């Protein structure tokens, strides 16, 4: 009797590949291309934050620290969000993580078992699907449409709930849609969570990048006693700290406590000097944050104006983030065909909307966290492409 030995586990073999990464890799063959792809600030980390990290190294904050994060940082995060949400938040409600991605990992680890379902928006950040797959869970996409201003609606969520629903992931402000969920929808989703007993995992990494009169509301502030939530956040976008890899998750103590044990078995702890920098970000001046958000707003205005003047492409004016989700259905091409043609023939790298889910077909995600001159050049190239349709 012979045995067939498996080298690679089925989970790894079937892990969903990201079309965002596929486009990044394709763009490597076009080094001169203008890129509206990378989802990160083009600003450098503010000087006082970098200085705090350097001081941490000089003061030998280079050893193991507490798995859940250094107490001063957890306390500072708790104080910030207690004030914003008008509810009690203590250090025991906070877990520091390697970016928001590990925070999402922990949130799913403590709430989802193999075979259980997680409702997600479609379109949404593609790593949601991968993280759910890694756990043996089932992602249940709920359509989010342009007809509804790219707003995730509670009535659509209700129709997707089954007896296997363990969690829902919401993302407001939204990557890739640039929309902000209405408070009334969040209140209803909180009601559904209590009625059906699932956890709301709220990805809020763009919570401070909102424009005009857009009103961001966290799921954590919609009901005084509501605690069926885990809020995922990060220093990456707000403070231009993507490479520092510092994120966090906030929730009830019973959900947060096991995460320290998970951290011990994965990475032990986030470097102390990185956490010192994050502490300086929270406790230091916020003028750089205000400056960056004002700059993104100006760039949002620029790309909105330019796209409005190009045939066959349109977009809703983003309320938040630094992403525009542009409708290209009139071009008669798939998202991947359009993105590939723009790259190969016009030297412009974009992300096909289909990378974010089936509902993203017929769209391109355009990142406007780039210099205004880059936006102008990119829109010139989109116009040249459109003129050939």
Image (cartoon, rainbow, N blue to C red):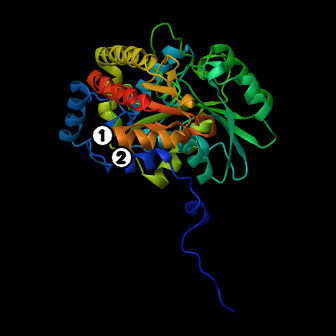
Q: Marks 1 and 2: in contact by CB < 8 Å?
A: yes
Q: From the viewer's perspective, is 32 left or right of 122?
A: left
Q: Badge 2: how crowded within 10 Å, few (<14), some, or many (20+)?
A: many
* Quarter of the image that includes the N terminus: bottom right
Locate residue 215, reporting x and y percent. 54, 11
The residue lying furthest to the top in this view is: 213
In this rendered view, identify the residue nearer to me: 244 or 44.
Answer: 44
Return the mark for residue 252: none
Locate residue 256, reporting x and y percent. 56, 37
Q: From the viewer's perspective, is 185 left or right of 365?
A: right
Q: How many marks?
A: 2
Q: Which residue is mark 2?
A: 27
Q: Which residue is mark 1?
A: 33
The residue lying furthest to the bottom in this view is: 1
Position above or below: 376 against 248: above
Q: Which residue is painted at 77% across and 29% down in the image?
A: 158
The answer to whether residue 329 is visible is: yes
Label 2 SS:
helix
The residue lying furthest to the front in this view is: 388
Q: Which residue is painted at 61% across and 23% down in the image?
A: 146
Q: Badge 1: how crowded within 10 Å, few (<14), some, or many (20+)?
A: some
């Amino acid at each position: 009797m012979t045995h067939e030995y498996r080298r690679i586990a089925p989970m790894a073999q079937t892990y969903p590949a990201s079309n965002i990464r596929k486009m990044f890799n394709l763009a490597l063959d076009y080094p001169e291309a203008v890129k509206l792809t990378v989802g990160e600030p083009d600003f450098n980390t503010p000087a006082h934050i970098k200085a705090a990290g350097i001081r941490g190294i000089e003061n030998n904050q280079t050893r193991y620290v507490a798995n859940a994060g250094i107490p001063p940082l957890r306390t500072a995060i708790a104080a910030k969000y207690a004030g914003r949400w008008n509810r009690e938040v203590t250090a025991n409600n906070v877990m520091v993580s390697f970016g928001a991605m590990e925070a999402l990992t922990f949130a799913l680890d403590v709430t989802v078992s193999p075979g259980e379902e997680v409702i997600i928006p479609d379109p949404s950040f593609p790593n949601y699907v991968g993280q759910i797959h890694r756990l043996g869970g089932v992602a249940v996409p709920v359509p989010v449409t342009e007809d509804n201003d790219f707003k995730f609606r509670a009535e659509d969520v209700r129709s997707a709930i089954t007896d296997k629903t363990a969690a829902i992931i919401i993302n407001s402000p939204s990557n890739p849609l640039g929309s902000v969920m209405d408070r009334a929808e969040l209140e209803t989703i909180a009601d559904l969570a209590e009625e059906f007993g699932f956890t709301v995992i709220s990805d809020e990494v763009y919570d401070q990048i909102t424009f005009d009169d857009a009103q961001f509301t966290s799921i954590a502030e919609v009901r005084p006693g509501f605690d069926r939530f885990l809020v995922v956040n990060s220093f990456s976008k707000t403070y231009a700290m993507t490479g520092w890899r510092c994120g966090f998750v906030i929730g009830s103590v019973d959900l947060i406590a096991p995460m320290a044990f998970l951290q011990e078995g994965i990475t032990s702890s986030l470097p102390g000097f990185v956490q010192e920098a994050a502490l300086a970000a929270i406790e230091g001046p916020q003028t750089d944050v205000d400056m960056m958000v004002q700059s993104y707003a100006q760039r949002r205005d620029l790309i909105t104006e330019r796209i409005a003047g190009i045939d066959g492409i349109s977009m809703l004016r983003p309320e938040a983030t630094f992403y525009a989700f542009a409708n290209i259905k009139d071009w008669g091409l798939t998202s991947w065909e359009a993105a590939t043609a723009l790259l190969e023939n016009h030297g412009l790298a974009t992300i096909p909307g289909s990378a974010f889910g089936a509902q993203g077909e017929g769209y391109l995600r355009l990142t406007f966290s780039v210099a205004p001159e880059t936006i102008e050049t990119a829109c010139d190239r989109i116009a040249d492409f459109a003129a050939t349709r």
